[in-house]
């Protein structure tokens, strides 16, 4: 238990005793005498704290010092504290008793620091000004500090009134100048004084600080520690607050002063943030100088209600054929990417970001496709991994419309905890201005681990897998911020792609099941498929999009209808085919078609495909145009067919883009082009 709590309990007991026995004023006098004696005598404090001297000897010393000077009750209380082994905090107990007395009687003790000793008239004026300001009786103690060159600083409980001029340079200043500055500051006290609430560090370590005071502090408020360390309030206890530190806890020590900032944790947002790599506090990590921004936006924000939203109806093209055809993602949706480590989860997210480059082109504008601004949030990743992602985005020209928020594995747990919320704040800036944004959270498993660490250090009760009870709310309040706004609010959208890492394919673990239940579908990546060379390694059977066809253009909806069923039949028959060799023609045909579809859906990393080409490829696959093509030649056939069609039948792609439908004349052109090309295609 902290020293403050113990001393408060003993002081409170003494106060109750004084009131019960109706000797309040006598006990107050005794307490002041005992406190001043202990505070001024270093030798007496050393004796009481010494582990070598026995408690019996300590009792005799205290009796000799205070006998006949204090009441019997006060003396008995002293001996009782020694008996309980708490003599080392006697000074704190009586200091706390005096604080309780002051609170009870409406007295404030003020510590006033000035550059020179003040005369009585100025002392009285300062005290009366403070009494007028606080509407309480003020008992002032005056000190001199050479660092101040003018004015004064008044400390009252958890408030500081700073009306001083600090010494910046070691310049020679005459005493009459100082007096003039002091009088000027005093006359303008009401208008110019800088008032801030302060607290005291009780305990610090492991990125957590417990602070006494700050009685009016808000949850999630930023507080300022010495040496430029910023903290955020997470726990609001009865007699102290628990803060998480965004810097080195080694720079803070017990007894340090903590200032309120009156600002809840927020993140700088604006157009100039595009192309930048920043940490979750908005500080630059890319060496490109200070971050320019328009305003601060709170990182925690209540998700919008049903009335402010509308249904998801516009597609967000990922450029990955298997996703856009079978697990479509709409603007404003939350689609989970889940799988074991090293199965290509980040690759899907990065491909999606790269594919948004088309939405910023003149061609997209011509076809009514609105631009999508991207945010990539890296939580608990290696710095080298984040650097590779940024390099790839720059190489692809995607950083022009992307912001990267990075809280690497080397950063403190509090930064990893707030990083996704900071990314959401950037996405909301674009959404609320009627535009479209995409936020990738890579990954939320590591955020949950960081939050578990903070919660355990803050002594919050652990639950399943030692996660705190509100770990579901941790992710639900983040992902609920993804939405498609109503037309009245501008019709903007925020799409979320959270990533979750599973352990050995266990999707029924605590965090995966939580996030699956929050999101609008999941893309499940399987290590066996990945190792077999099927990349992206999407298990179509358990991957789903709960928005479905609403997030597809009509042409894609039309061609991809049977694709999922064909693949499901193939996977089922593939298992049986391994047991026997005598298969009927229908089964062989299903297996043959399935093998070609699997090959067709394979795709290289960082090469997203345009939606019109995806539609043509899927049409060829589902309508048996690949029957005569060897499985190993399918990808080459697809590539060469698109080159052929772009040269000879460009109207196929033009029609799909302009009408967003697959009309009969376009289908006829695709059939004609396919038959013509199959005759010319050379098998390897």
Image (tube, grey):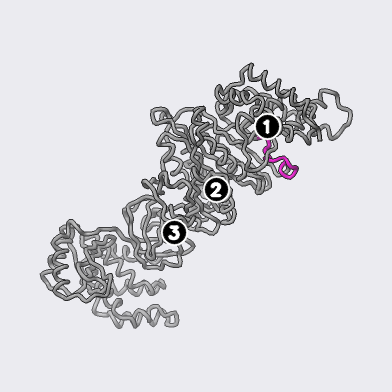
- How crowded pointer 3 is (Cα within 10 Å; few <14, some 14-19, many 20+) is rated as many
The quadrant of the rendering that contains the C terminus is top right
Q: Determine whether label 2 and label 1 are within 8 Å by CB.
A: no
Region in magenta: 529-542
Left or right for 317, reference 283: right
Residue 517 located within the stretch drawn in magenta: no
- Residue 680, x across and y down, in percent: 77, 27
- How crowded pointer 1 is (Cα within 10 Å; few <14, some 14-19, many 20+) is rated as few
For residue 23, above or below residue 635: below
Residue depicted at 33% across the width and 60% down the height: 259
Q: Is residue 508 visible?
A: no
- Residue 402, x across and y down, in percent: 50, 44
**Comparing labels 2 and 3, the label whose residue is closer to the camera:** 2
Left or right for 269, reference 384: left
Residue 538 located within the stretch drawn in magenta: yes
For residue 665, above or below residue 635: above
Nearest to the observer: residue 99 or residue 352: 352
Residue depicted at 58% across the width and 25% down the height: 654
In terms of image quadrants, where is residue 137?
bottom left
Label 1 residue SS: helix
The mark that comes first in sequence, 2 or 3, is: 3
What is the C-alpha distance between the residues marked 1 and 3? Answer: 57 Å
Left or right for 607, reference 62: right
Label 3 residue SS: strand
Q: Name the mark on residue 643.
A: 1
Nearest to the observer: residue 156 or residue 641: 641
In terms of image quadrants, where is residue 31?
bottom left
Q: Name the mark on residue 394.
A: 2
Q: Check the image and name the residue furthest to the right.
A: 582
Q: Determine whether label 1 and label 3 are within 8 Å by CB.
A: no
The mark that comes first in sequence, 2 or 1, is: 2
The residue carrying mark 3 is 245
């Amino acid at each position: 238990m902290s020293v403050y709590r113990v001393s408060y309990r003993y002081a409170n007991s003494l106060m109750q005793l004084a009131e019960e026995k109706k000797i309040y004023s006598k006990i107050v006098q005794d307490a002041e005498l005992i406190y001043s004696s202990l505070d001024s005598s270093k030798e007496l404090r050393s004796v009481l704290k010494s582990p070598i001297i026995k408690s019996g000897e300590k009792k005799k010393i205290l009796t000799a010092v205070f006998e006949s000077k204090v009441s019997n009750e006060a003396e008995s209380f002293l001996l009782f504290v020694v008996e309980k082994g708490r003599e080392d905090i006697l000074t704190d107990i009586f200091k706390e008793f005096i604080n309780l007395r002051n609170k009870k009687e409406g007295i404030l003790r003020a510590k006033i620091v000035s550059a020179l000793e003040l005369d009585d008239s100025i002392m009285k004026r300062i005290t009366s000004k403070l009494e007028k300001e606080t509407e309480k009786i003020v008992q002032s103690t005056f000190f001199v500090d050479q660092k101040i060159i003018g004015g004064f600083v008044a400390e009252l409980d958890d408030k500081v009134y700073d009306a001083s001029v600090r010494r910046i340079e070691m310049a020679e200043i005459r005493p009459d100048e100082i007096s003039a500055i002091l009088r000027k500051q005093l006359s303008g006290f009401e208008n110019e004084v800088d008032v801030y609430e302060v607290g005291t560090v009780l305990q610090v370590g492991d990125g957590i600080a417990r602070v006494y005071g700050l009685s009016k502090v808000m949850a999630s408020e930023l507080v300022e520690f010495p040496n430029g360390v910023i903290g955020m309030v997470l726990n609001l206890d009865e007699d102290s607050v628990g803060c998480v530190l965004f810097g080195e806890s080694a720079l803070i020590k017990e007894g340090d002063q903590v200032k309120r900032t009156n600002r809840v944790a927020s993140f700088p947002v604006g157009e100039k943030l595009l192309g930048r790599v920043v940490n979750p506090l908005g500080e630059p990590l890319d060496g490109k100088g200070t971050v320019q921004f328009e305003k601060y936006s709170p990182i925690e924000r209540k998700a919008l209600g049903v009335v402010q939203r509308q249904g998801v109806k516009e597609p967000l093209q990922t450029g990955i054929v298997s996703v856009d055809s079978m697990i479509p993602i709409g603007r404003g949706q939350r689609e989970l990417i889940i799988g074991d480590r090293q199965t290509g989860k980040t690759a899907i997210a990065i491909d999606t970001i790269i594919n948004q480059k088309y939405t910023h082109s003149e061609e997209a504008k011509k076809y009514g496709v609105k631009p999508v601004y991207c945010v990539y949030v890296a939580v608990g990743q290696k710095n080298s991994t984040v650097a590779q992602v940024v390099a790839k985005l720059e190489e692809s020209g995607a950083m022009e419309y992307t912001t990267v928020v990075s809280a690497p594995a080397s950063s403190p747990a509090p930064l990893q905890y707030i990083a996704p919320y900071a990314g959401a704040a950037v996405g909301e800036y674009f959404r609320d201005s009627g535009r479209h944004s995409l936020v990738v959270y890579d990954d939320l498993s590591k955020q949950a681990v960081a939050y578990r660490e903070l919660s355990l250090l803050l002594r919050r009760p652990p639950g399943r897998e030692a996660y705190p009870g509100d770990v579901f709310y941790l992710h639900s309040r983040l992902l609920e911020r993804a939405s498609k706004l109503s037309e009245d609010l501008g019709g903007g959208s925020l799409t979320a792609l959270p990533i979750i890492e599973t352990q050995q394919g266990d999707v029924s673990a605590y965090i995966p099941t939580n996030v699956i239940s929050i999101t609008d579908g999941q893309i499940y990546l399987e290590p066996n498929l990945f190792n077999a060379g099927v990349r992206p390694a999407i298990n179509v059977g358990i991957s789903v999009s709960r928005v479905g066809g609403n997030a597809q253009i009509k042409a894609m909806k039309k061609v991809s209808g049977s694709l999922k069923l064909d693949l499901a039949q193939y996977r089922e028959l593939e298992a049986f085919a391994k047991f026997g060799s005598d298969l009927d023609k229908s089964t062989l045909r299903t297996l043959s078609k399935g093998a070609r579809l699997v090959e067709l859906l394979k795709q290289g990393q960082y090469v997203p495909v345009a939606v019109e080409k995806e539609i043509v490829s899927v049409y060829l696959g589902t309508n048996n145009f690949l029957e005569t093509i060897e499985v190993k030649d399918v990808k080459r056939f697809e590539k060469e067919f698109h080159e052929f069609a772009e040269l000879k039948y460009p109207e196929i792609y033009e029609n799909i883009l302009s009408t967003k439908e697959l009309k009969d004349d376009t289908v006829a052109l695709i059939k004609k082009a396919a038959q013509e090309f199959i005759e010319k295609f050379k098998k390897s």
